[in-house]
Amino acid sequence: MNDAIEIRDQRPRASLLAALLRSLGLFLAGAGTAFLFFVSAYPLGLIKAYPAPPAAAAEGPLGFEQRVEDVDDLYRGPDEPMQAYLDRLTKAVAAGVVHYWTEGDSWAAADTRYTRISVFDNYLLWMLSFQPQYRENLQNYEFVTPRKALDRGYGFCSQVSKIVYSVLADQGIDATIYSVPEHTVVESNGNVLDSDYGVFVPHPLVDIQQDPSIIDSYYAQFGSMLPLLKKAYGQSWRQLGTAQDFDNVRAYEAKFERLKWAPPLMVLAMGVLLAAAGMLLQRRRQARLMPVPR
């Protein structure tokens, strides 16, 4: 008699546990699916992670001419002469990235909405951007991965220089980013690549530094900016980062690009497992309750 009472008491508990596991599993599976959709929406092109720059920037002399749809188009062709390729690369990157800041020609807090890592791009880095130790870097972040920077579509001269540098480094073409307070450019094979203005100068930076008037004909269409540019080119340029520095940052970006997929997939997998466990427990209980044929 006592054994029969104990068996009857266990049945409701087993049924409740099965229902609880199934419900929790279905909830987590649904949450994981929604989370996965959120993470994949930007890579799939379903949403825009970053706001569009103002029309004044996009329509200005340094605005969009043609977006770079395929990063592979920025790579050197099989028989393309080096100098012609570097010229093409300079202009292609300049045409696909807008130079824009909200206040003058330097970063300000108002630019954060444009330059912070977007929650739709990488929610992990977005959350880190609120931490004091990461705020300065991640709220004014410049991508080293070309596709990331081109997708965002705007940035300062240092950002376009990082795009050019990365494309060249990927191909094993020697390149160095140089900077002064007023400007940043890339030097490669004795040529200066200024993708902020879309200007290719077939002279070494050291020669231009000694005689800034060399740039006059190349920047002729930017007459109002020429005095500032000549002042910049006449200064002592410093190297902006080493090859190892940029390799480390690119690896950092790639790591977080992979990591952002882990939480939604884990939640989804856990939900499926719990739901399956609940259903299996329910089936076993029903099997025990079925009458045994005599």
Image (tube, grey):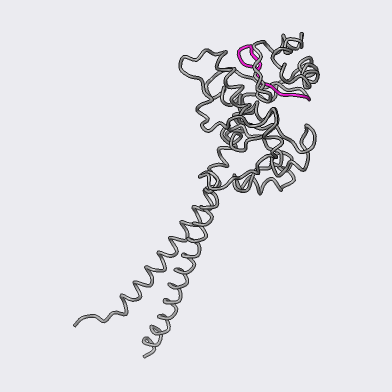
Q: Which residue is drawn at 53% across and 33% down?
A: 69
Where residue 161 sits, quadrant-wise, is top right
Q: Which residue is drawn at 39% across and 85% down?
A: 8
Viewer-proximal residue among 123 and 16: 123
Image x and y of residue 279, in percent? 39, 68
Q: As drawn, which residue projects farthest toward the bottom?
A: 1
Horizontal side, residue 37 vs residue 87: left or right: left
Q: In which quarter of the image is the N terminus?
A: bottom left
Where residue 61 sits, quadrant-wise, is top right
Q: Is residue 202 above or below residue 57?
A: above
Q: In this view, does 43 lie above or below 80?
A: below
Image x and y of residue 247, in percent? 59, 29
Q: As drawn, which residue projects farthest toward the left?
A: 294
Image x and y of residue 146, in percent? 58, 31
- Write the start and end of the magenta stretch as one range: 182-192
Horizontal side, residue 250 vs residue 2: left or right: right
Viewer-proximal residue among 9 and 87: 87
Viewer-proximal residue among 195 and 205: 195
Residue 185 falls within the magenta-colored stretch: yes
Label tally? 0
Q: In this view, does 17 lie above or below 270?
A: below
Q: Residue at x 52, y 60 (%)?
A: 31
Main SS of the magenta part reads: strand
